[in-house]
Image (cartoon, rainbow, N blue to C red):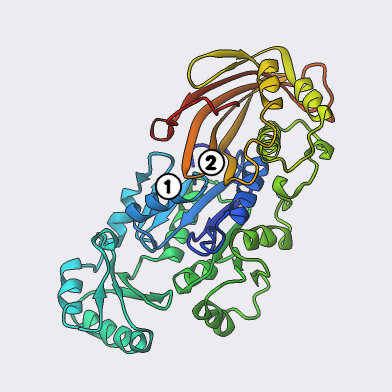
Amino acid sequence: MDRLSENARLMIVSDLDHTMVDHHDPENLSLLRFNALWEANYRSNSLLVFSTGRSPTLYKELRKEKPMLTPDITIMSVGTEITYGNSMEPDNGWAEFLNQKWDRNIVSEETSKITELTLQSKTEQRPHKVSFYVQKEKAEEITRSLSSCLKERGLDVKIIYSGGTDLDILPQGAGKGKALAYLHDKFKAEGKLPKNTLVCGDSGNDAELFTIPDVHGVMVSNAMEELLQWHAIYAKNNPKIIHAKERCASGIIQAIGHFNIGPSISPRDVTDLSDSTLDNFDPAYEVVKFFLFYERWRLAEIGKSELYMANLKAVCSNSGILVHPSGIEKHLHDCVNSLRTCYGDKRGQAFRVWVDQVLPVQVGSDAWLVKFKKWEQSGGERVCCLTTALLSSKDVTVADGLTWVHVHQTWLNEASPSSSADWLF
């Protein structure tokens, strides 16, 4: 990735449904725990890759439903599409590679003869992927006969059965593991192979990820039988692959700690953030910590103490200014005073705050410019603003934390609120 000038400290490659995203966790706590850990400790020097069976359409739908971070790289449609960055720029070289010995028309023709196959929705049919539903007891027989038939027609395909119902037909060179191997080769060619890669999955279409040389791997605790069976046959004695005790994103955090590849305590797991100590000034951690306090204050998850307000004013410059997304300028100390009156106003509500793409740049010996997206979800409404903050270490110690000097916010086009009266920071 062009964003990093050297080898990534860590690259996490994670499946989404039932791996990064826990659909049985209505409060999304495990995902929010991961978000805070990633933005506080990894975003600036590491790479986040989402590898999903979802098509671009369903992937974007999931992003609207869940508090997901923005990945650096997205692998979609069971490893047949690779895109980069916020704009999801496609990797055309990957698409050209997959065209070898692949003819979608022939696949469609042969599968139409099998009555037990039910075509999935149009959104899930992609240039290099044809997807069906099939009953579990029929899957093995159909996979075997279809593989033979398509080989006779001159194609070289891969058939993946996963989730107990999904059957995907891809070019032989496709798949989540092959897409990751392709990315590794690209990084090697640029001299930027990540120092560590952690792959994360729960189902059969994730199995390939664990076969890539030198990666660490975690099967989350809720992994499906098909993946556990694959592991028992092919990777039982591989110390680099673990079956986590925790579900979904919490299992990913557990794996980071197990393999000792970086910090594994999420700021969301720190009860009193004011007691947290750092060795150096860390603007990303300060941003995450600030907005976690903001969430807890409004949910009344911490005590209503004037000491908190005094500490908050202490980390805001006396002359500091907040440019509200509406365009109104406010003194930061006035914003703190406004927050005082909002203690517990979200108590008992589905209110969450998270930050995404926290990227600090040092602009002086004692100053950092930090850009990030700040999200708030209250009930059914989700709003976001693009934020730029100037933080300073002048005349303070590491224990004091950084001082907020200036904050400028603008609404994200597709996520502006119906009313901005409730937006404080």
Q: Earlier in the sequence, mark 1 or mark 2?
A: 1
Vertical order, 6 against 366 (above or below): below
Q: Which residue is mark 2?
A: 378
Vertical order, 32 against 359 (above or below): below
Quadrant the C terminus occupies? top right
Q: Is residue 171 left or right of residue 307?
A: left
Instruction: Tell which of 194 and 17 is nearer to you.
Output: 17
Residue 86 can be seen in this image: yes
Vertical order, 276 against 416 (above or below): below
Vertical order, 116 against 105 (above or below): below
Hey, which quadrant is residue 259 in on the image? bottom right
Q: Is residue 275 left or right of residue 344?
A: right
Q: Where is residue 104 drawn, in percent x and y? A: 20, 67
Instruction: Tell which of 383 and 78 is nearer to you.
Output: 383
Please identify the residue farthest to the top as the structure is shown. 319
Q: Which residue is mark 1?
A: 64
Hey, which quadrant is residue 141 in on the image? bottom left
